[in-house]
Image (cartoon, rainbow, N blue to C red):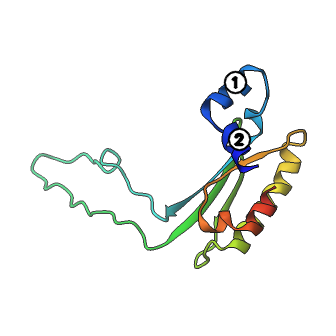
Amino acid sequence: MKAHRKDMCRPTQLLERYKTGEAFLQRILTGHESWIHDYDPECKAQSMEYRHKTCPSPRKFKVASSARKVLFTVFWDMERVVHVEFLEQGQTVICERYVSTLRALKLRLRRVRRDKDSILQHDNACPHAIRQTQDAGS
């Protein structure tokens, strides 16, 4: 079974499946997680101001990233973003949390993509690779 999956994911096999008209690309759903810092720095152009030649230039303070950050989880297909979640402050991604995210994703998919069986593509980080997570994702 695993060898068959590897064969089907080779670039040449994917290209052949696409050329034969198989609509598998529309079924692929990709998931990703990223940390978002809770600050909005200005670029240099936004902070510029007009001043007289004799006036001293304003002091610019270095903007440092905030200690507060949020984990952003997003799933999308080839047409749109399908599901978004933010992990609350102080929580960590463990198997149970990721399974609840996948369950919420499944409910969302029933409303958004009624006619398509999805192929979930996500990394093999520890919470994603555990058997419970794989069972919930299928």
Residue nearest the observer in this picture, 93 or 1: 1
Label 1: state its secondary structure: helix
| Left or right relative to 90: residue 7 | right
Q: Quadrant of residue 20?
A: top right
Q: Quadrant of residue 124?
A: bottom right
Mark sitting earlier along the chain (2/1): 1
Q: Amino acid at mark 1?
A: Glu
- Residue 53 vertical position relative to residue 58 in the rendered view, above or below: above
| Left or right relative to 60: residue 96 | right
Residue 100 rendering spot, x and y as whole percentages: 77, 68
Residue 19 rendering spot, x and y as whole percentages: 72, 20
* Residue hosting label 1: 16
| Left or right relative to 73: residue 112 | right
Q: Which mark is residue 77?
A: 2
Q: Residue at x 61, y 55 (%)?
A: 123
Label 2: state its secondary structure: loop
Q: Amino acid at mark 2?
A: Asp
